[in-house]
Image (tube, rainbow, N blue to C red):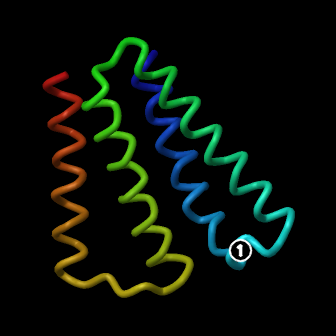
Amino acid sequence: MSWLVLVAAGLVEVAWAQSIKPTENFTRLWPTVLCFVLAAAAVYLLSLAMRTLPVGTAYAVFTGIGAVGAIVLGVLLYRDPLTWGRFAALALIVGGVVLARVTA
């Protein structure tokens, strides 16, 4: 169950990362409120997962999901370039997350 909560935390982190830009440097009220709610929800879910998972493993997986999600959504939504270097970085992050899961 902790792994499912951790995945949920990572997905909320992805949503949080995407919610930062619409705040326009925290000058727009409702996007800013949404941004802070998503950040708090992500950290709360991460803390729940850390009740039974090792801190380092949980945080590495959490940030890995967030990084991969942010890059993928950047490519899909904002037409960020998907270079070979970014693709290699994604592969390494996914490999690290899988290795962390398998060895935890």
Depicted 101 relative to depicted 88: above or below: above
Q: Residue 22's quadrant in the figure?
A: bottom right
Task: Give the image location of residue 7, x and y in percent.
Answer: 45, 35
For label 1, the SS is helix
Quickly name the residue at label 1.
Answer: 22
Which quarter of the rendered picture does the N terminus lie within? top left
Which quarter of the rendered picture does the C terminus lie within? top left
Can you name the residue that lies furthest to the top here?
Answer: 52
Residue at image x 17%, y 48%?
95
Left or right: 32 in relation to 21: right
Depicted 84 relative to depicted 33: above or below: below
Q: Residue 81's quadrant in the figure?
A: bottom left
Residue at image x 65%, y 64%?
19
Left or right: 86 in relation to 49: left
Residue at image x 72%, y 46%?
37
The kind of residue on which mark 1 rests is: Pro
Task: Give the image location of residue 25, x and y in percent.
Answer: 68, 76
